[in-house]
Image (cartoon, rainbow, N blue to C red):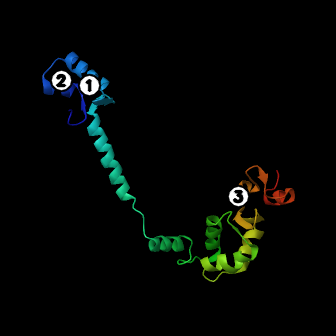
Amino acid sequence: MIPTATNSSSTIQSLQIAESEAEAALLKLESEGVVLRGNGNWCDRRLLARIHRYTLNRLRAEIEPVSGTHFMRFLFAWHHVTQKLSGIDGLRAIVAQLEGHEVPANAWERFIFPARMDRYDPAILDTLCLTGEVGWAKLTTGIGIFPRDHAAAWQSSGGQTILSVRAQRRVVPQP
């Protein structure tokens, strides 16, 4: 058994044999599946499997699931329910995060934005829509709000047109 990954020259020196004999022996061991060759190095197959198994176990230990409580805390913070945003930049961030999410029209200003913003003012959304930064459309069952520069992505879904031709001209003006 080769105790570690090694190259031919170190094997020749440690065994004090001719290079041709060492090369022939290593090739024979490789043909029997005892050793593996890669990048000029040789390694025992079982040792390589053990290294691989230890590496996978170490990586799996690093990715342990969290409790439901921690996950919910993360979601509330990530969706700005516990760490509320404010002002026009806050609303831009929320629109970007919820881009394309479909919600009944009245829920956006009654539930979604107020839950994520400190002192939500509907005039801020009006400003973003009127300046062309934010667009909205009925996607399938609800209204989706999105940054206007992403409007082309929301024009069609799976080959079906989501927006009417008239709405497409307004959302993405033709040159």
Decide: few, some or many residues near mark 1? Use Cα within 10 Å; few <14, some 14-19, many ≥20. some
Secondary structure of the residue carrying tag 1 is helix
Q: Which residue is mark 3?
A: 149
**Foreground residue among 58 and 105:** 58
Q: Is residue 74 above or below residue 8?
A: below
Residue shown at 29% from the left, 25% from the top: 32
Decide: few, some or many residues near mark 3? Use Cα within 10 Å; few <14, some 14-19, many ≥20. few
Say which amino acid is labelled 3.
Asp
Instruction: Say whether residue 171 is left or right of residue 53.
Output: right
User: Is residue 82 at all visible to an observer of this figure?
Assistant: yes
Foreground disc of the pair 2, 1: 1
Residue pushed farthest front?
Answer: 32
In three-dimensional space, the C-alpha distance between marks 1 and 3, rounded to whole angstroms, equals 61 Å
In three-dimensional space, the C-alpha distance between marks 2 and 1, rounded to whole angstroms, equals 15 Å
Residue shown at 75% from the left, 73% from the top: 105
Q: Earlier in the sequence, mark 1 or mark 3?
A: 1
Residue 6: percent from left, percent from top: 24, 32
Say which amino acid is labelled 2.
Ile
